[in-house]
Each structure stands twice: as structure tokens, then as C-alpha cells.
Amino acid sequence: MFDATALQAIAAELNETILHGRVQDVVQLDALSFGFEIYAQHARRYLYVTAHPDDARIHLVARSAKLRGSGQAPSPLLLSLRKHAENAFVDSITQLPNERVLKIQLDHSAEGVATLVVETIGKYSNIILIDAEGIVIDAVKRVDSNMNRARVILPRKKYVPPPPQSKLNPATLTASKLDRVLDENPDAPLWQTLVKNIAGVSPLLAREVAHRISLSSPEFPSEKIFNYLNDLSRAPWRPTVAYEENDPAAFAPYALTHFTNTRPFDSISQAIEAFFGATPYESYAAVKEPLRVQIAEGRDKLARKRDALAQEQSRANDIERLQISGEMILAYAYQIKPRQENLRAETEIGELEIKLDPSLSAVENSQKYFRDYHRAKDSAARVPALLAAANAELEYAEQMLNDLEEAENRAEIDAVIQAASTAGLIKN
């Protein structure tokens, strides 16, 4: 639920409340969480930031009691924050477009400019402090090349943001582009199509759009979908917490009409605090982890199947060479000596070096090539369709893992279980 839209609302709220404020104190609450006391607009504000994989987030909290330090020895990042953030002024607060990444630029009279980067991206969540040149000062999670070759996060290394999503950009999305997306996915549920194809659209936002569309039309007119996506992803915000059997089930910066029991809040931070204040950190981790393992095993099995088919297709592309090799062995059979290992022959496709099995006669070698030729010919007819299906199944398994990571309530987890079971990725 702490998706790109929620972070967009948080960025707007922080710009209204703590921009140009002065950081008076920084405390570490636990191994992955920090609290900031910021004096802005003649009032003390308390900012909570955590990189916990199951509930990474950033928001204001109402009471400073929640931001008392852990009492443990200060971590390297805390020491860096005390040096670069305490007594610094908040210069700017920006969100990486369509991503769950927030940047807070700080200006310190002695240390200069630094930026706090908060990445709320599931198990890859991180809190990173970088200098004015974009060099990492430190991070709550240091990531070396053995952990991630593509994206190292270590002190004195250049900060590289998360790779952009290969999806449609909402800023340039049009109703006609949306039409094409819907036409390409005629059998998929609307919400899945939106999540799969549009950057920054989470399952929660997509389900809300799909629900509103279903109330107004049995079909999916792209113009209405486009309008709903725009309306729900910008101010005026309507922060809401949804409840299931009196327990918080979801929060969003917009009204959650696909839930029956909801409560509005004055700010997105209040909604988030209400949600997590009654939900333990590990609320659904115990349910999600074994499910993730099962789906990952199913995905790996599909990947092996896909690789085997790809290898078979590469052999199928060698049909002509196999046929000519068999024919040339027969043509030069009288020249082939016992235990000969190869044969050079001029053919219509140029000079060909043909490997021979020294344990077989010339005729037996020829028959072996003809058998391989017929198998390759058969593969050429059937493998492309099988490979396309395997790629689609593998992509679906990856989508299931992504949906599970972003699932924030029991209903969303159950939806993943149902979909993964139907696809044969897990056993009930």
C-alpha cells in the first residue's frame, strides 16, 4: 500500500509542513528506522523513516514519544546523519517520478549540501545519505557487488537510483495508448493489466480504478480509466483507511470505495500512522514468506523449462546442416576409415566439417545425423509455440511474486494464492 501514489501524497504533505524547516535532532529507533525532529512553521514536527522490508515508509507522526532512540551504540549511518543532517535546513523534497523513492535535500552551514534518499521498495528498501556530488556517504543497508552487481550502494561509490520500470509513463499516457494496452490483454482482469503496463500503478490503486469502472459501466472505456487514474493520483487527496472486521486492511491517499468499511483522515500521515499503529511490523510476513518460496520454486522450474526449449530451438535452427551432413557421409562413405573422427566435404553451403562418432560405421553415422535431422525438423514445427507459452508462464510467475511483495492485506494475499494455485505454481 505504500506505493508511488502514497509517496506522492507524502511528498506533497512534507512540502507543506517541513520544507525550509531546521533538523534539530536525529535518533535511531532500531536497526532500520530513524526519527527526525524538525522545527518548521513555528512548530516541532516528527518524521519517521524506516527501511523494514515489510513496511518501509516515511511519514509524520503525532507524538515525539514514538521517536525515542533505541539506546544502542550509534550506527555508521546515524553518525553521518548527526554530522550532515542535525542543524541542517530542508531545502527541497522531491519524488522520483512514478517510483517509491523520495529525496530530501539538506543544507548544513558547515558540511554543505547532502541528500537523504528514502527507497521504500519492499525487500530492497534502503535509507541512503549522499553528498552534493551524488556520492554515497553511508546507507542503512550497504550493498556490495556480490549482493547486486548492477547497483552497488557503498560509501564513496556513486549513487545510482533504482532502474526505471519498463512500463508506460503516466505523464505521457493517453486514452488511445490505454486502448492499445486493453486490446493486447483482452482476457486479463483490468486491474492486472493496469499494474503490468503502467508505471507507478499498484494493485491497490488498480483495484480501486477497476471497482469504480465496474459501478459505472460493464465495459472498460479507456477514457474513464484514464480519468480515474488521473483523479486518484493527484490532489485534492482524500486519505482513507479501510477496515476488515475492525482491523486495518489498507490505506491510500484516495477514497477506497471497493471496501465497505472505511474511515477518512485529515492527512496521509495520519492515515498511515492509524494503519501501522494497529498493525504489527511482521503482520503478514509469516503468511507471505512460505508462499513466496513456493512461487519462486515454481518460477525457477518454469525458467529451466524455458531454457531447455530455447536450447532445443537453437538446435532446430540447424536443420539444413544436419540433413547435408547425413547426405555427405553417405556420399563419402567409401573414403571414411574405421574410427575416423571427422569429415571435410564441399557442399552447397560451403565447406563443412562433419564430426563423426569413431565407434560407429559410416552408414551408422549417416543414420544418426538423419535421426537428428528429423527431430530438429519436428522441433522447428512445435518448439516456437511451446517457447512462447513458457515465456508467458514465466512472466506470469514473476508478476505473482511482485503482487505478493506488494500485497498489504489478507484479501490481496488470498488473491495471489488463488491466482498462483490456478496457474499451477503452488499446491493448496
Image (cartoon, grey):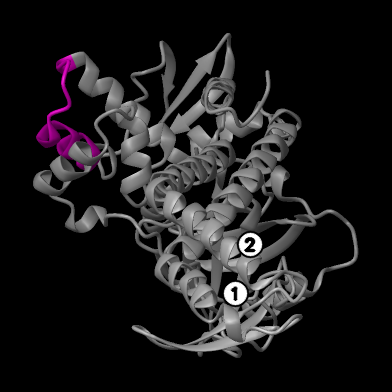
Image point 51% across, 38% down: which residue?
403
Total marks in image: 2
Q: Which image quarter: residue 358?
A: bottom right
Q: Callout 1: few (<14), some (14-19), or many (20+) C-alpha neighbours within 10 Å?
A: some
Numbered mark located on residue 151 in the image = 1
Q: Secondary structure at mark 1?
A: loop
Residue bearing mark 2: 126
In this rendering, is residue 242 above or below 111? Answer: above
Lower position in the chain sequence, tag 2 or tag 1:
2
Query: Picture coordinates of residue 362 (x, y %)?
Result: 63, 73
Is residue 120 visible to us here? Answer: no
Q: Is residue 222 magenta?
A: yes
Q: Which residues are magenta?
A: 216-231
Closer to us: 248 or 307: 307
Q: Amino acid at mark 2?
A: Asn
Q: Callout 2: few (<14), some (14-19), or many (20+) C-alpha neighbours within 10 Å?
A: many
Q: Is residue 20 left or right of residue 54?
A: left
Query: Picture coordinates of residue 337 (x, y %)?
Result: 70, 84
Q: Is residue 130 magenta?
A: no
Query: Picture coordinates of residue 245 (x, y %)?
Result: 58, 8
Closer to us: 318 or 277: 318
